[in-house]
Amino acid sequence: MNAGMAHSYESQFGPASDPIDIAQFIRIATELETQAPISVPMFSPSPCSVAGFEAMDQLPEEYKESVAEECSITDIKSSIEEMLDNPTLYAHITKTHDTNVYLIHEHADTSGRRKRKRPALLDPAHEAPAVTALQKTLDSVQLKSWQLMLDSALFMRAPKNSDLNVLTAIKKSVDPSSSSQFEHTSSSRKTALISLTVYNRLSWGHNLLSRSSQHALLASQTLGDLFEAIPCTSNEIPEERMVNGEIVGYETPTAESPETGSSGCVICIEGKAYGDGISENDYADKLIAHFEKFPSSKRDPIAKGPTSIYETLLSSLSLRLNQPYYFLHQGNCEHFVVIDQIRLLHPSDPSPALIPAATPVLVPSSSPPSAAPAAILESTNPYPLTLQITPPLPPLCRACSKVPAIYSIVGDMRLGESPCVLCKVCWRVMGDGDEDVMVVPLPKYELGW
């Protein structure tokens, strides 16, 4: 990785942590939880750690109740809920906020460009009485931080596409069979939850990354589970339909079609390239062979991982937080996986359901009874969880450059390129081409949602 790219990644994610051995982390964290006092469980909130709690606990009950009543925010909460439940009041608050933000950006913009039409507020004399009363209440707030100042523009940015989420709820795994395994003991059933984010390169700046999706996996799952959980628009590229060596059409993959299987991938983690293992010469071998063509001074040392992604448990790895790990599939589709958090599984997290494993574990008769392993249980769990998916941006029509394209035109001599993406209106205006022209509908980018 060159210095410019490393500086760009560090400025976006922050400095990477030291390598964290997942298996050792689970063992140490489980021991700490086991040694914790029974009266104060590790995961239950407790005020005991707050300074002065013992002195407060010794005060009379009447005094503590008066303090609790004074610190209560029930009246503020009820007022906000009443305002949000009233469409007229909520619309007034929203429009007032948008207008204030516009004025702040307009004041900060010194480019001299032509300004857009300023959003105007209604005359207070024409407002509803409830709106007028609400505005007077807000104006009477004495907090200086309540109103947005003109200098607030320094801390604002425009909304980005990656701020959106196509999911309305956490998406659970649809695969009933999971490669994760647990041992049926109280201590060994402890596992870690790994939260990660997948990033894509920006087309206009290859050193800049944009968030694509966020996921949560168990440490007992594999890199293959991660690969299958990542939604990518490259998985929906129409496949060529060949007859006698010639392309006669295209088929768009669907969630029900058998063609939507894995095409292979490679994930680079801490100097190891973990391939898919589908063929003898898989993605990892091809990537390493490609790197060997670079001069030794311009390539990072990398070796093929000892196991494939479907055999590599996350608990067997050492991972670093805020470190982008390279992920390649579909030929040239690149992603970067960044570990955000590693923690023990919380009681409020979705719990995996355990069932007896189909393959029994054989123990030699000469082994002592204490060496007999616990019963292995397979989990039909909801993991990996998908927490966020950024809505993909469809390409614009090459003719009008205003409307998203829905067709890919192949083999039309009237167009400057083949394939050429067009919207429905532009293609209707052009009219149908020759018989050799193929019109391929663009994918809707819904796989993995």
Image (cartoon, rainbow, N blue to C red):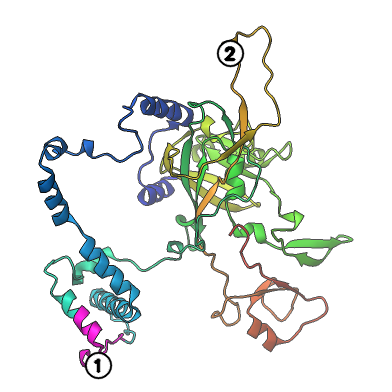
- Residue 292: image x %, image y %? 60, 38
In what element is the residue under mark 2? helix
Q: In which quarter of the image is residue 34?
A: top left
Report how far apart the C-alphas of labels 1 and 2 lie in the structure: 83 Å
Give the quadrant of the C terminus: bottom right
Q: How crowded is mark 2: few (under 14 residues within 10 Å), some or many (20 or more)?
A: few
Residue span colored magenta: 118-134
In what element is the residue under mark 1? helix
Q: Quadrant of residue 277?
A: top right
Q: Can residue 1 be seen in this view?
A: no
Is 211 above or below relative to 99? above
The reply, left or right, for residue 180 in relation to residue 74 is: right
Is 222 above or below relative to 89? above
Q: What residue type is labelled 1?
A: His
- Residue 312: image x %, image y %? 59, 34
The reply, left or right, for residue 368 in relation to residue 337 is: right
Numbered mark located on residue 126 in the image: 1
Q: Which amino acid does label 2 sit on?
A: Ala
Choose between 438 and 216: the one closer to the eye: 216
Choose between 96 and 160: the one closer to the eye: 96
- The residue that appears at 63% across and 68% down in the rendered structure is 444
Q: Mark 2 points at which residue?
A: 371
- Residue 206: image x %, image y %? 48, 56
Is 317 above or below relative to 262? above
Numbered mark located on residue 13 in the image: none
Nearer-N-terminus badge (1/2) = 1
Choose between 278 and 124: the one closer to the eye: 124
In the image, farthest residue toward the right: 244
Q: Can residue 209 be seen in this view?
A: yes
In the image, farthest residue toward the top: 366
